[in-house]
Amino acid sequence: MTTKLSELTEEEVLRKEEEGKKLNIYRNMTGVLSYQFLESSIPAQPVYAAGYEELRAIPQMDDGGIAMMIPKDPIDRDPLPDPDPIIVTVDISSPAANAIISGIPTGAVVDFRGTAWVDSGDGAVKQVSVQIGSGAYQSATLNGDGTWVLPSVILSTPGQVQITAKALHTNNKATSIRKITVTVQLAQAPDLILPTVAVTSPSSGAVLSSGAVTIQGTAGDDRGVTRVELIQNNGAPVLTESGDGYRTWKKTITLQQGANSIQVRAYDAANNFGTTSISLYADTTLPKIGILSPLNGAQVAGTFSQGAVVEISGTAEDAGGIDYVEISTDHSELFTRGSAQAPGDWTKWKATLTFNTTGKHFVTARVVDRAKNSVETILEINVSIMPEVNSRLKRIILVESYRLSSYLANYGAGRTIKTFSLLPGEKSKISVRSYSQDEKTMKSAATIKTRTGMSSLYPIICV
C-alpha cells in the first residue's frame, strides 16, 4: 500500500464522515493500494486485487484498524479506477504577508523561505521558483523535507513589492502558486548635495539712491530648502520671507551709506548650505557740479554766418561716482551729453554750444551720479551777433605807376574809355589788364585829366 494509506488514521476517517465524505480504497495503476474521500452521493470505486479480482471493503475491526479486503464476485469485473489527482501546494513562511521590510539606502537584504509538498497523487515537488515584483523567476534551494529558501535577495525599490512562489511537480505539469505583498522601507541616503541660491534683484554692484532695498532671489535643493538667511556686512543672519518653500524669497533691509556686502545662505534639512554674495553701494548724498568757464554774465560775440560759439567747462564730484554730465540752453528739456576728460572720469568736463541770436541766454548743466541723484546749475551769458566785417588786412593791394609812352599800339597815343567825376575824398576802383600775344606785348594805359585839361600822372590801384 502507499505511504499515504499506511498513515491514514481512524480519526481522519471519522472526521471526513462527519463532513459527509466516505472513504474509498482502490488500487492505482501501479497495483498499490491507495485511498480517497468521496462525497456520500458518489458511489465508491471498486478495489482490484492482483489479477484484477474485485475486492469489497469489510467493516472496521474493533481495534480501529482497517479490515482486509475480500474478493467479491470474481466474474463481475470493472475497469481500473482513475488515479489520484496530483495536487501540489507551496507556501511562503518568511517574510509574512504584508510585512514591512527595512534596509539601508542601497537596499534591504531578505531571505525568502517556505515549504512545498504534494497534497494528492504520486510523485514529488521538483522545483520552487520565486519572482520578485515583475522580475524573472529565480530558482530557490529545495530541501528533502519540502522546505525551500531563496537567500540574500536585495530589494532596492521602496514601496510595496509582490512576492510570488511557484512549485513544480515532477511530472512537469502540476504547479502551485502563492503570492504575498510586502512593503520595503529604505533608510535615507546621506545628503551630500548642497542647496543652490541666487539673487535676482538688485544686481551686484548696483548703486542705489535709497537706503531701503528689497533683496529677492531663488533657492533649490533635491530634498528641499528649509530656510534662507541674509547676512549684511558680516552681521547677524536674518531670516528671509517665502511662501513657496523658499523656491523664491525676499527680504527688505536698510543699507548703510557707502559700500555694503550682502551674503545669502540656503540650508537643507541636513544643514548643508549654499551661498552667494553681492555688493551694493548706497548713495543718498547729492552730487556736486560747477561751471568754471565762462563766468556768469560773460559777454560773448559772434557773426550772422557762424553764430557765437561758446565752450562750457566745469567740474563734478560724487562719492559713489558720476554717471554723466549734460547741458541744455534756455531752459529746454532737451539735454546734450557733455564730454568727460577720460572714459568714466567726469571730475572735469566740457561742452560746446552755439548761439545765433543776440541777447541773454541761459546754460543749464546737470550732473547725474550712479545712484541717479542729480543736481543742476545755471549760467547766464550775454550774446551779441554782428554782421560780417571784411578787414583790409585780409586784402592784397598793388600800387603801380604808368607814364605816357610813345608806343602807340593799336590805339594810337591814347584813347578815352570813360570819363567820370571824382570828388575830393572819394574812392573809386580802376582795373587795368594787360594782354600778351605772340612775342609782342600790348599794354593799356589810363590817364586822368584834371578840370584844366592838363594831364597828370595818378596812381592806379589794381585789385
Image (cartoon, helix red, strand yellow):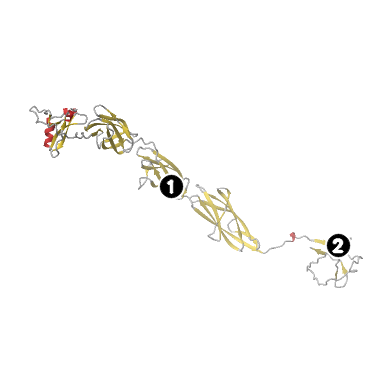
Please state which of residues 461 and 418 is positioned toward the viewer in this rendering: 418
Residue 20 in the image: state x and y as whole percent: 12, 38
The numbered dot on residue 137 is none
Quadrant (top left, top right, bottom left, bottom right) of the N terminus: top left
Q: Residue 424 appears at what percent x and percent y?
A: 80, 69
Furthest residue in direction left, as rendered: 62
Which quadrant, please, contains the C terminus?
A: bottom right
Within 10 angstroms of label 1, few (less than 14), some, or many (20 or more) residues? some
Q: Give x and y (percent) for residue 318.
A: 51, 48
Task: Name the residue: 38% across, 36% down.
Answer: 192
Q: Is residue 245 left or right of residue 445?
A: left
Inspect this view and state whether residue 260 appears: no
**Amino acid type of the residue tagged 1 in the rendering:** Thr
Local SS, label 1: strand
Q: What's the mark number on residue 200?
A: 1
Q: Which residue is mark 2?
A: 436
Percent position of residue 33, x then y: 17, 29
- Say what amino acid the circle numbered 2 marks: Ser
Residue under the image location 81 percent in, 64 percent down: 461
Q: Is residue 293 above or below residue 37?
A: below
Res. 192 in view: yes
Pick whichever, 263 or 61, lies toward us: 61
